Image: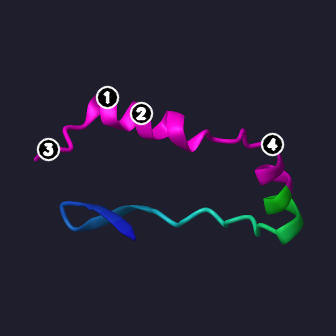
């Protein structure tokens, strides 16, 4: 993408290269994620949302 000022190019934006995520790195990330108690999550959501709509 080229940024212009009064039709004159002044800058160019390019995306940064993305690092590839390996399966091993993804598994390592998920290994440290805490478990979620489904009943507690449901209670928290119910406390915020009105299910009678």
Distance, label 1 to label 4, CA atoms, is 28 Å
Say which element carries label 1. helix
The label on residue 43 is: 2
Image side of residue 47 versus residue 18, left or right: left
Which comes sooner in the sequence, label 3 or label 1?
A: 1
* Residue linked to disc 4: 32
Position of 1 with respect to 4 (left or right) is right
Which secondary structure lies at badge 4?
A: loop
The stretch of residues the image draws in magenta is 28-53
Foreground of the two, 23 or 16: 23
Label pair 4/3, CB-CB below 8 angstroms: no
Distance from disc 2 to disc 4, alpha carbons, whole Å, reads 24 Å
- Asked if the magenta segment contains residue 46, the reply would be yes
Mark 1 or mark 4, which is nearer to you?
Answer: 1
> Counting residues from the N terminus, which is met first, the one under dot 1 or under dot 4?
4
Q: Which residue is mark 3?
A: 52
Choose between 20 and 11: the one closer to the eye: 20
Lateral position of residue 47 relative to residue 51, left or right: right
**On screen, residue 33 above or below 25:** above
Provide residue 31's location: percent of width, then percent of height.
83, 49
- CB under 8 Å between callouts 3 and 1? no
* Residue 29 covered by magenta stretch: yes
N-terminal of the pair, mark 3 or mark 2, is 2
Q: Residue at x 72, y 38 (%)?
A: 34
The mark that comes first in sequence, 2 or 4, is: 4
Q: In terms of secondary structure, where does tag 2 sit?
A: helix
Quick check: marks 1 and 2 in contact, CB under 8 Å? yes
Q: Which residue is mark 1?
A: 47
Between the C-alphas of marks 3 and 2, the distance is 15 Å
């Amino acid at each position: 993408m080229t940024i212009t000022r009064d039709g004159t190019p002044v800058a160019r934006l390019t995306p940064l290269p993305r690092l590839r995520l390996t399966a091993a790195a993804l598994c390592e990330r998920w290994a440290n994620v805490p478990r979620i108690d489904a009943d507690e999550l449901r209670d928290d959501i119910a406390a915020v949302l009105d299910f009678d709509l």
